[in-house]
Amino acid sequence: MKTHAKQSIELDHLNLTPEAKTEVSNLIQSLLTQAQNELKLLEAKNQALKLELAHLRRIRFGAKSEALSQPQFSLFEEDWQTDAAAIEAEIEQLPLPVPQKPKRARAGRQPLPDHLPRIEHRHEPESCQCKQCGSDLVKIGEDVSEQLDVKPAEFFVHRHIRPQYACRACETVVAEPVPPAVIDGSMATPGLLAWITICKYLDHLPLYRIAQIAAREGVTLSLSTLAEWIGRVGVALQPLVDRLILHLLHGSVLHADETPVAQLDPGSGRTQRAYLWAYRSNDFELGPRIIVFDYQTSRSGKHAQNFLNSWQGHLLVDDYGGYKALFSKTASPCTELGCWAHARRKFFDLHQANASTVAYEVLQRIGGLYAVEAEGKHLSTEARQILRAEKSLPILQSLHDWLLQTRAQTANGGGTAKAIDYTLKRWQSLIRYASSGHLPIDNNPVENTIRPIALGKKNWLFTGSERAGKRAAAIQTLLGTAKLNGLNPAQWLADTLEKLPTWPNSRIDELLPLAPEDIEALLKECE
């Protein structure tokens, strides 16, 4: 009103007819309205760009945790701590007198693991007589301290001697046969094969680095030999992977996710994008914990359909369109579960970008949902369902009403609108978990399992072929499942490679990298 009145006063000074004044006034008002609309569009675009920039900066430089109140730690914090310790050590070595300073309070040292072997070193005094008066010393106690030591990769040789005996009467020679091995005629023992496999697929060391480690100990292992061993180990372990897939698909709830990997394109000198698909069991269900990796040359949703085949149940995924066909009425009857971690991430990025009060409010409400999950983590399925009905469902209903009201007052195109639209669009799949006691709230279990492989890509950069990718996925399936079940992957693999050559196929479940109680349950089901 003030702007319009000011325009009228200014137009009164002009020698215009009333009709001209009206026309000019309308033109000015039209231009002003257009400018205001353009300004709103620019503000929305600016907000979106700030959101994207903050997200990229967090991925590139920041900590990956999305805790709202957690301080950001420097990437070089460990270097600063190392430098500080080195400077203190150098100061202690200076011949100059150094003023005494109070020692920093340090956390108590963690006790060394009991399962480690102990090598005792007794430090007795040179004499059992007192240096002051010559009297005999009497033992009154002991001061015991422990230090942790390590040996680098220690190579040793197993020499197998099989005496040969002859029967002069029968003219025959008797000798014990060569023990069967995973690789017949190879000089590699199961322990060496396990060490190489763990280095490559768990520690993400390329084969040439493994060869360098061996060379430092005076052992020559050619790259062609290492590659051959890895290839044969992968073939030998494949039946175990097939059994894990079978047991995984017996579950009624699965997590699914995928991560890109580079695959070398022979002849072009370039790489093409492939994908490592991951499927994980549900921790709220009875049964073994299993992670299965499936290597494919694209991100097409047909790969998920082919893997799951006729499987029926609840599938927890993100909003990637490749999964949508699984939830259509014409496809296999899979029920979609939404991931609250993905929904929360939209608002977290928005809050990081411009301290949005809307995003902060949503984060607080979603935090209430996770507080309920923490409270019910160790409850039974029935008790957890009751807890969710009492606490989670009211939070969800209140959040839904608040989002609808806020969205009606939010302009289109901005980061706030996009974050709210993402959540409302997937609302039915997001709230489905709260009506049960066995459905998970998010996809973090599979993301946590796939993350070490994603980080390992910085070491090996790309796979050499599709076959190599599938072999890596198979071995990662076994090692990842072993870790999920609290097993030492190296010990399990060495033991399995030793047993595998003579192990009957009818008892193959006993070799799976599962907890002992889960193996017993599987064996009872097969009886």
Image (cartoon, rainbow, N blue to C red):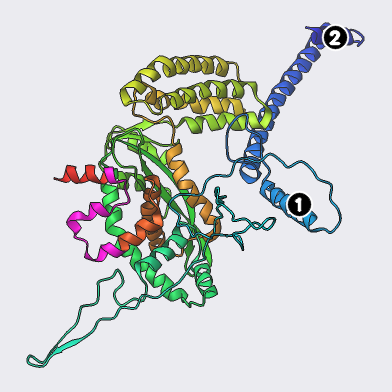
Q: Secondary structure at mark 2?
A: helix
The residue lying at 61 percent from left, 23 percent from top is 360
Q: Could you say which is closer to the camera, residue 193 or residue 52? A: 193
Q: Secondary structure at mark 1?
A: helix
Outermost residue on the left side: it is: 169
The image quadrant of residue 313 is top left
The residue lying at 45 percent from left, 57 percent from top is 117
Whether the magenta-drawn stretch holds residue 410 is answered as no
- Give the residue at mark 2: 6
Q: Is residue 78 visible?
A: yes
Comes first in the chain, label 2 or label 1? 2
Q: Which residues are magenta?
A: 498-517
Whether residue 75 sits left or right of residue 240 in the image: it is right
Q: How busy is the neighbourhood of tag 1: few (under 14 within 10 Å), some, or many (20 plus)?
A: few
The image quadrant of residue 410 is top right
The residue lying at 91 percent from left, 11 percent from top is 14
What is the number of the mark on residue 300?
none
Callout 1 amino acid: Glu
Quarter of the picture containing the N terminus is top right
Whether residue 196 sits left or right of residue 89 in the image: it is left
Callout 2 amino acid: Lys
Residue 14 higher or lower than 372, as above or below: above
Whether residue 340 sits left or right of residue 362 in the image: it is left
Label 2 and label 1: CA atoms lie apart by 72 Å
Q: Position of residue 98 (x, y in %)?
A: 84, 50
Q: Could you say which is closer to the camera, residue 367 or residue 161? A: 161
- Give the residue at mark 1: 88
